[in-house]
Amino acid sequence: MHGSATGDGGQSLRVHALLRQLAPEYLDRFGSTMPGRQRQVLKKILSCRTPALGGQLFQCADCSGFAYRYHSCNDRHCPQCGQSDADGWLEAQKARLLLAVPYFLVTFTVPEELRLFIRSHLKSALDLLFALSSQALQELAGNPRRLGAQLGMLGVLHTWSRTLIFHPHIHYLIPGGGLSLDGRQWVRAPKNFLLHHKALGAHVRTLFKERLRKKHPDLFASVPAAVWKHPWNVGCQAAGSGQNALRYLSRYVFKTATSNRKVQRLAEGKLQWTYRESKTRQFTSLKLEPLQFMSRFLQHILPRGFARVRTFGWLHPAAKVRANRVRALLRQQPLLTPAEEQTWQPPTDPPSKVAQPPAPKLPCAPDCPRCHKAMQWVGTWRAGQVLLYPKRPP
């Protein structure tokens, strides 16, 4: 059941159900002018967990009850996909990234005057934002008068605010210290301080301006000169062990803009979007026209293949030697491949015992909707195949 009455004559719907409800009108009015990428992703989202993508059929052995479980689209923009992927990513990052040092969360936010330009040139502008914000961090940290060390950084791009407007910013989770410039020592950052936020903001603005002018002169000419006078907002805050910050970042690694939360569709026709104010931490809401909500959601669809999560410095996959040097200096277990783990930590089983491959995992069977007993998996059909039907009871 996708919706329920709200008591004021309106309806409460999940985001995915709301998108399905609004899509026909939106496509009718704006489909001819929509970017092809948005149309493509919207089509996938609308088919998520429907017969169009195939699924599994389950049947009860005791009665004639049956149930379908439809496949997910697994698109990173879909509000109802990706939770299990996010959980797996979080555990993998904990093992690979988290060290026994304090962490910092550094956030680079693009000034409002530059956001329309970035939205119009999404891939090239966001690639620049990643490259130059990470460069600004490394150059300031490498200054002997500051930290005098090489950083390791995990960067995650968000393009939305709590009200779903276009608000590009990159969060960097950074260990509180770095590898000395000669690669021989671990340089610990001062307590509750990594780098000066105003210096970072000024440096990334200069880098962005100069790189855009040299590499994309045509795009640079389209930016008003006054834009470069506005400061870039950079936040730098202590993040303790990094666990909570990493958990926060994981929520939207495999989702975009919002989870599959409930939205109130009011009797007057507008939507009531509830969110928490970042400054006051109090919940508030705003009213949106339905198609305005649809437009706000779709503007966060990223170009095909664009990497929202990136690592830099000695946390980059190509810098494994430096990452293990850091781990050795901090007296922590090195990063090892599965084959290396067998050498570094011998297996507990006797060498003569050959490990058996795991049995294929069958779909988790739901309970029968009629008699509430466990159902049996009957079969799977793929997208484009004829829908499977249950066998009739004798």
Image (cartoon, grey):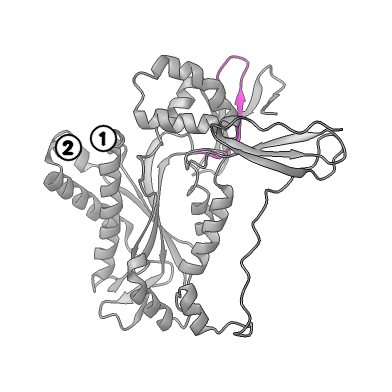
Q: Is residue 261 magenta?
A: yes
Report the Cα–Cα distance between label 1 and label 2.
Answer: 9 Å
- Of the 4 image quadrants, the one containing the N terminus is top right
Residue located farthest toward the front when viewing the structure as drawn: 394
Pick the front one: 44 or 356: 356
Q: Quadrant of residue 167?
A: top left
Residue 394 falls left or right of residue 123: right
Residue for badge 2? 219
Residue for badge 1? 117
Pick the front one: 225 or 252: 252
Q: Secondary structure at mark 1?
A: helix
Is 309 rendered above or below residue 62?
below
Residue type at mark 1: give it: Phe
Rendering coords of residue 149 (x, y %): 30, 73
Residue appearing at x 25%, y 43% in the figure: 124
**Main secondary structure type of the part rendered in magenta:** loop
Rendering coords of residue 29 (x, y %): 42, 14
Residue appearing at x 40%, y 36% in the figure: 301
Residue type at mark 2: give it: Leu
Rendering coords of residue 377 (x, y %): 73, 44
Sequence-earlier tag: 1 or 2 = 1
